[in-house]
Each structure stands twice: as structure tokens, then as C-alpha cells.
Amino acid sequence: MPSDKLRKLEIEVNAAFEAYRDMYFEGGVSSVYFWDIDNGFAGVVLLKKETDGAINAKEDVKGCWDSIHVVECNERKSSKHVKYKLTSTVMLWLQTQNVATTGTMNLGGSLTRQTEQDVVISEQSPHLANIGKMIEDQENKMRAILNEVYFGKARQIVGELRSVESTTEIKSRDELVDDIKRAVASKKGKDEV
């Protein structure tokens, strides 16, 4: 059980991350837990958002975003300096299904990042604000990495491996190209005569 002071902070941070979750994830669940350690406190911020709905009549997308943020706060007794250590892990999975064209695709993975900050604690910069800003910044960076690197690369690979055209459409297109080539070759032959 955390100390009374830490329990009060835990309640405040829980309320703040409920608002954060609603703003960034438009629902889901969140929980914050703190515990005392020798030189300060540590805690975990958990965020989860699942989707289980159709985008439109043709495509169904399911997925889950899990964020686990472990924070350690080492307070120096002789000063107002605090060292925060944050380890964040995002676990993500998506499943898309478009029966008419691409079939089913599953994509999942996790990403972990760490950061540290030395901060002077004041009334203008309390633990709640410092922890909240660190987690928000870390999640934004991780979301950008996932979007650019993982999903961008996955899009490229899927685009190279899968065709959204049916075999019949590809065959018709190839026949049209062959007809155009023959027509151009025939016209070219007549022009040379």
C-alpha cells in the first residue's frame, strides 16, 4: 500500500490519465498504480484500447493498443531535484479482413523505449505534470515510429506481395496491353511502307 501522500498522487494521476485516454484513444481503460521505494516512488500507467468494428460493409478491422509505462522517481532529500526514469512498451495488433479483395491480414508487435529526465520540482512543475508530459511525449514518439517504420514498411510489403485486382482483371488488362502493342506495331509497319 502506498503512503497517504503517494496514494493522493495516485488518485490524481488516475484522474488525469482518464482524461488523457478519452482525448487520445476515445475510450478504453486506464489504471495507475504507485508504490514507495527507498529514495522516492515508482509506478505504472496502463492504457488499453480495443476496436472490434467494421469500417464499412466491405472491410472489417479489429485491433488492440496496450501501453505500459513504468516510471521511477528518485527524489534527492537535500534538494528539489528529481530524476525520472521511464520505460514504455506499446503492444499492438491489427487484423484487417476484406473478403472481396485482399482477404485477411494480421499485423502485431511491440516497441519499447526508455528515457530519463532530471527536473526541479516546484508548484508549477509537480510530479503529475512531469510524469504526464513524459508519458505523452513518449507515446507520441512511439506512435510516430510505429506509423512510419512498421506500418509504412508493412504497407510497402503488402503492396508488393498482394494485388487488389482479381486474376480476371489482371488477365483482361494484360490482353488489352497486348492488343495495344499489336495495334501500335501494325500502325508502325504501315507507316514505314
Image: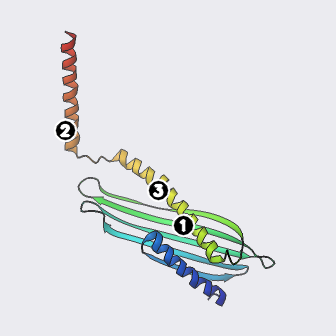
- Residue visible at 44% across and 51% down in the picture: 152
Image x and y of residue 56, in percent: 27, 62
Secondary structure found at label 1: strand
Q: Which amino acid does label 2 sit on?
A: Ser
Whether 79 is drawn above or below 139: the answer is below
Residue 23 can be seen in this image: yes
Residue 89, label in figure: 1
> Decide: marks 1, 3 in contact (CB < 8 A)?
no
Q: Quadrant of residue 103?
A: bottom left
- Residue visible at 25% across and 53% down in the picture: 101
Quadrant that contains the N terminus:
bottom right
For the view shown, which residue lies furthest in the front direction? 124
Q: What residue type is labelled 1?
A: Thr
Image x and y of residue 167, in percent: 22, 44
Residue 144, label in figure: none
* Residue marked by disc 2: 172
* Residue marked by disc 3: 147
Q: Residues within 10 Å of mark 3 (few under 14, many from 20)?
A: few
Secondary structure found at label 3: helix
Q: Which amino acid does label 3 sit on?
A: Asn
Distance from disc 2 to disc 1, alpha carbons, whole Å, reads: 48 Å
Q: How crowded is mark 2: few (under 14 residues within 10 Å), some or many (20 or more)?
A: few
For the view shown, which residue lies furthest in the bottom direction? 4
In the rendered structure, the answer to whether residue 97 lies left or right of residue 5 reads left
